[in-house]
Amino acid sequence: MKPIEKDDRVTMGELDVEECLVLLRWELVGRLAVAVPGEAPTVVPVSFALDAGTVVFRTDEGEKRSRLLQQPVSMQVDRFDWYRRVGWSVLVQGQAHEIDPAELDGLDIQPWAPGDKAHAIRIVPTSITGRRLELLPTERDRLGYL
Amino acid sequence: MRNVDTRTGIEILDRDECLRLLRQDEIGRLSVIDGRAPVVLPVNYAMDGEDVVFRTAAGTKLRVGPGARASFEIDSFDRSTHSGWSVLVAGRLEEVDVYDVNGQTQRAIRPWAAGTRDHWIRLQASRITGRIVRGIRPVSNSGEKRAP
């Protein structure tokens, strides 16, 4: 892990690609973000699996499927520990490609939403970044402000 | 009245239900377009009326101009029942002076990532949507179904 910069309240550390992949391997649900021309990006939870450094998931929605194949997409995953106030976030950015659903056989994709999702998508990453986030217990800074 | 898609079992939430969920949470994800690709980053937030207000550290690379379109998402997922919900707020961002954010909202936002100079940002909501996904109801040992 890269050196962590400390200050009074928080520490933050950047995660390298290998650390990001290790974290993603344990997760079931991520958030798929797709750019929509002229609008805010859509963000929706999807069940995914990691497959040889790529992200795969199922989809069935016609209009949204064609849109995600045309735009750069991202998959974000995070996890926070409320008691110890630590967390991490990983962002995979890349290009989505439609693949044969048979390529998902044997991969553990727990369904987020029911419905017949006949199509399979693979995101080939152009960038995998991650960050560790930690908030120390003090609620006020040195001057007494929150 | 519940609005459930009978084919998928997905329940669409109305605006009031979405706002209720937004008021209960404190971590959400902001999504903006950086170049062509979307970035998604977790932020501490609070609701100010129907707007989402959050703080970002000065070092955070949020390269957006005033009025930039952005989304804000919160969700929860229960692995054992495969149930969950998500809420999505779409709107435009504006950087605001901390003094334009009411005191209660200010106190509610404790940022995860600190910086020596924080930027306060308001997402003016134009569209708030949400849904609940109910998975398989687990059957208890006695054979009776538990309520979701």
Image (spheres, rainbow, N blue to C red):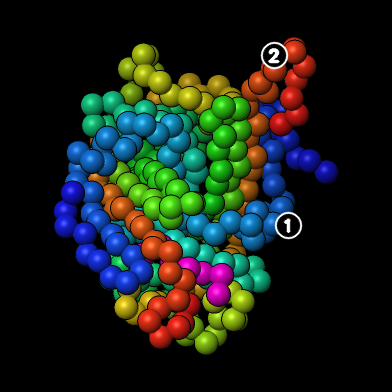
Contact, CB < 8 Å: mark 1 with mark 2?
A: no
Residue A99 seen from this side = yes
Residue A121 seen from this side = no
**Residue A14: percent from left, percent from top:** 23, 54
Quadrant in the rendering for residue A75: top left
Q: Residues within 10 Å of mark 2 (few under 14, many from 20)?
A: few
**Any magenta on residue A22?**
no
The amino acid type found where label 1 is placed reads: Asp
Q: Nearer the viewer, residue B6 or A69?
A: B6
**Residue A24: percent from left, percent from top:** 33, 36
Which residue does the image show at 43% across and 31% down from the upper left?
Answer: A28
User: What's the magenta region?
Assistant: B107-113
Quadrant in the rendering for residue A19: top left
Marking on residue B16: 1
Quadrant in the rendering for residue B128: bottom right
Marking on residue A38: none
Which residue does the image show at 59% across and 50% down from the upper left?
Answer: B87
* Left or right of B20, for residue B1: right
Majority SS type along the magenta span: loop
Question: Tag 1, which chain?
Answer: B
B109 above or below B14? below
Mark 1 or 2: in front is 2
**Residue A4: percent from left, percent from top:** 21, 59
Question: Tag 2, which chain?
Answer: B
Q: Nearer the viewer, residue B87 or A66?
A: B87
